[in-house]
Amino acid sequence: MPLFKSAPRLLGGRLSADFVNATPSNAELTWEHLVHFLESTSVVSAGRGAQLLSLPQSDPQAAEALLLKAQRLDSALRKVFAAMLRKQRIAGEWIEPLNNILRITEGHDELVSQAGIWKIEFVAREGGLDWLLAAVARSGAEIIAEGPRARLRLCANPHCGLFFYDNSRTRRRRWCSMAVCGNRSKVAAFARKHASARNAP
Ligand SMILES: [Zn+2]
């Protein structure tokens, strides 16, 4: 039986936003969700993902340690992003889980071509498992370092809760996805208008 009905929607525009979006705000990141996220964002291959799924059986300590770090990173990023959106101060204790991963991971930056666009990607030296979280931590750190210039947004649908980075040319993106939340809002507005027109004398 497949663990997941569908692939997570990667609408965040940045890896760290997608990472936070992968778990609802009231739920804790599980091992399966973590592995699925790493696989769907191509941090690991499908084969490596399958290996990782069985890690809690083969090496429970390693799996537990990584999951704990991932959960701390998840909760820290969520707090940081929420504070940035409210233009509030970012607490040092939220930064620690990020620095923790940035510190331990050894590796180097490399230019990688993605659909004709060159991007700087962190290539980690594969020692422990921490490198699996390196790209997420790096992506979060970049957004934080952008400070007030960061185009981090929360979807305008109050029931959605997804973060996204506004990469649009006009910088006026309001929805995580036009197809999902944007249309839903338009349909609701249309229904309201229609209902008030009908109820008018
Ligand atoms: Zn949305």
Image (cartoon, helix red, strand yellow):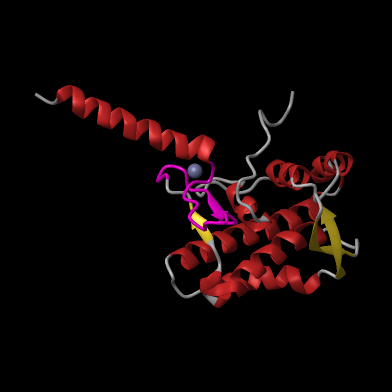
In front of the other: 138 or 55: 138
* Residue furthest out toward the front: 170
In the visual, does 120 lie left or right of 141? right
Is residue 60 within the magenta segment? no
x and y, in percent, of residue 29 in the image: 63, 48
In front of the other: 106 or 178: 178
Q: Quadrant of the N terminus?
A: top right
* Residue furthest out toward the left: 201
**Main SS of residues in magenta:** loop
Q: Quadrant of the C terminus?
A: top left
x and y, in percent, of residue 186 in the image: 39, 35
Please give the name of the residue rendered at 66% of the width and 69% of the height, measured from the top-left corner: 142
Is residue 169 within the magenta segment? yes
In the visual, does 89 lie left or right of 93? left
In front of the other: 128 or 124: 124
- The range drawn in magenta is 157-177
**Which quadrant of the view contains residue 194?**
top left
Please give the name of the residue rendered at 57% of the width and 59% of the height, measured from the top-left corner: 75
x and y, in percent, of residue 187 in the image: 39, 31
Q: Relative to residue 90, is residue 134 depicted above or below?
A: above
x and y, in percent, of residue 52 in the image: 83, 44
Q: Relative to residue 4, is residue 25 depicted above or below?
A: below
Please give the name of the residue rendered at 56% of the width and 67% of the height, measured from the top-left corner: 150
Please give the name of the residue rendered at 71% of the width and 71% of the height, measured from the top-left corner: 100
Q: How many marks?
A: 0
